[in-house]
Image (cartoon, rainbow, N blue to C red):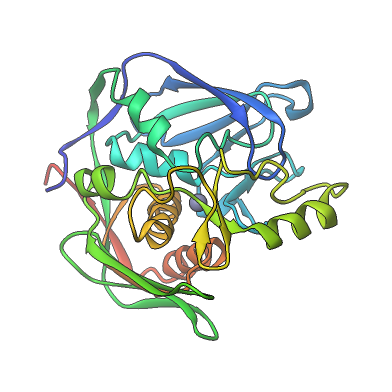
C-alpha cells in the first residue's frame, strides 16, 4: 500500500559521531522540509561554503564503499545511504539535513540509531500527493557476475545474493515495504574483513578521500576467517546480506521517489545501484510517474 500524501518530520533532530571513511566527527541536524523538496544535504562548516546538494542519482560521485553526493566544485557528503534507508523505513519524503563535515556519522554501522530517534518524533502529513515511480520494462546494470536488475511489479520487492569467502552464499528476498524494512533490515550493520580494513587505513590515510579510517568493532562488523570479532556477535544469522538490502534501499531513494518494481541482484555494490538508476532514467519508456491520489 502506498501513502496518499507526502510526509516530513514535526521537529528537528540531531546526531553526532565519526564517519566510517573519514574517521572525523560530524554533527547533523535533520529539519522538516516543504512538500516536493525531497532530501537536501547542506554543508554548514566553513569548508562546505553552505553548499546544498539534493540526494539524487544525478549528483553521485563514485567513491569506494559508500554513496557520495557532490556538487560541481567537489563539495561532497559521503555515506548518506543508511540515513536514506531510515527515511524510507520511517516514511519520510522531505527533509533538510545540515552537516558540519563531509560524512554522515556511521553510528553503529546500521540505520537503527536513526530510526529509533525518528520514531520518537511525529511524522506529519503534507499537502502534496506522494508520487511513485512505476517501472515499465526490465533494466539491468552489470559488471561481470555482479548485477542489479529492476522489472515491473505492483510493489517494491528485493532479492539479493552475495558470496563471501569462507562464509558462503547468502540470500534475502521479500517485500521491501517500509514496515518490513524497518523490522528486518534496518538493524543490519555494515561489515568488512579486518585485513582489508587495515590495508585500506594504511593505503588511504593521507588521500583526499580516505577509506575505513573510522572502521572498528563499534562502527562495523569486523570479520576474521568465517567469524565476526564483535562482542555479542551477529544480530541475525544473515546480517551481512540484510545490510546489502539496506544499502540498496538507501540507494534507490536517490530516484527521488519510492519505486514500484522487482529488484534482483548478485554481489551488488553502490556503484551498480547508481548505474541502474542512471540507465533507468535515461530511457523514458522504462518508467512513469504515478500520483498516489489518482
Ligand atoms: Zn552500508
Question: Residue at (72%, 32%) from the top-left corner?
Answer: 24
From what the image shows, is residue 59 above or below residue 43?
A: below
Based on the displayed image, in which of its 4 quarters is residue 192 positioned?
A: bottom right
Question: Residue at (37%, 38%) from the top-left corner?
Answer: 86
Q: Position of residue 242 (x, y in %)?
A: 36, 57
From what the image shows, is residue 214 above or below residue 44?
A: below
Based on the displayed image, in which of its 4 quarters is residue 157 positioned?
A: bottom left
From what the image shows, is residue 264 above or below residue 3?
A: below
**For residue 30, side relative to residue 42 (left or right):** left
Q: Work out which residue is located at the far top of the displayed protein and give it.
A: 11
Q: Work out which residue is located at the far right of the displayed protein and give it.
A: 206
Question: Residue at (49%, 46%) from the top-left corner?
Answer: 81
Based on the displayed image, in which of its 4 quarters is residue 263 positioned?
A: bottom left
Q: Work out which residue is located at the far bottom of the displayed protein and give it.
A: 144
The mark total stands at 0
Name the one closer to the observer, 13 or 277.
Answer: 13
Name the one closer to the observer, 230 or 69.
Answer: 230
Q: Position of residue 144 (x, y in %)?
A: 55, 86
From what the image shows, is residue 100 above or below residue 253?
A: above
Name the one closer to the observer, 68 or 291.
Answer: 68
Q: Position of residue 67 (x, y in %)?
A: 57, 51
Name the one closer to the observer, 206 or 74.
Answer: 206
**For residue 13, side relative to residue 105 (left or right):** left
**For residue 48, side relative to residue 157 (left or right):** right
Q: Position of residue 265 (x, y in %)?
A: 39, 74
**For residue 37, side relative to residue 176 (left or right):** right
Question: Residue at (11%, 48%) from the top-left corner?
Answer: 1
Amino acid at each position: 500500500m502506498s501513502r496518499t500524501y507526502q510526509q516530513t518530520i514535526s521537529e528537528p533532530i540531531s546526531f553526532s559521531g565519526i564517519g566510517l571513511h573519514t574517521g572525523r566527527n560530524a554533527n547533523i541536524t535533520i529539519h522538516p522540509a516543504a512538500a516536493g523538496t525531497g532530501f537536501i544535504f547542506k554543508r554548514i562548516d566553513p569548508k562546505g561554503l553552505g553548499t546544498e546538494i539534493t540526494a539524487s542519482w544525478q549528483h553521485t560521485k563514485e567513491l569506494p564503499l559508500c554513496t557520495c553526493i557532490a556538487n560541481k566544485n567537489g563539495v561532497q557528503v559521503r555515506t548518506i545511504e543508511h540515513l536514506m534507508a531510515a527515511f524510507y523505513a520511517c516514511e519520510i519524503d522531505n527533509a533538510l539535513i545540515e552537516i558540519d563535515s563531509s560524512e554522515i556519522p556511521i553510528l553503529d554501522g546500521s540505520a537503527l540509531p536513526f530510526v529509533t530517534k525518528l520514531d520518537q518524533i511525529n511524522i506529519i502529513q503534507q499537502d502534496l500527493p506522494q508520487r511513485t515511480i512505476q517501472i515499465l520494462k526490465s533494466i539491468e546494470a552489470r559488471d561481470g557476475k555482479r548485477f542489479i536488475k529492476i522489472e515491473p511489479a505492483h510493489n517494491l520487492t528485493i532479492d539479493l545474493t552475495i558470496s563471501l569467502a569462507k562464509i558462503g552464499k547468502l540470500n534475502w528476498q521479500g517485500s521491501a515495504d517500509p514496515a518490513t524494512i524497518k523490522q528486518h533490515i534496518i538493524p543490519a550493520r555494515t561489515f568488512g574483513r579486518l585485513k582489508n580494513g587495515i590495508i585500506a587505513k594504511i593505503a588511504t590515510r593521507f588521500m583526499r578521500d580516505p577509506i575505513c579510517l573510522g572502521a572498528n568493532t563499534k562502527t562495523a562488523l569486523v570479520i576474521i576467517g568465517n567469524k565476526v570479532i564483535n562482542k555479542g556477535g551477529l544480530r541475525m544469522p544473515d546480517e551481512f546480506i540484510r545490510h546489502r538490502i539496506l544499502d540498496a534501499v538507501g540507494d534507490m531513494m536517490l530516484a527521488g521517489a519510492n519505486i514500484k518494481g522487482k529488484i534482483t541482484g548478485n554481489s551488488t555494490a553502490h556503484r551498480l545501484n547508481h548505474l541502474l538508476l542512471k540507465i533507468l532514467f535515461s530511457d523514458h519508456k522504462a518508467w512513469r510517474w504515478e500520483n498516489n491520489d489518482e
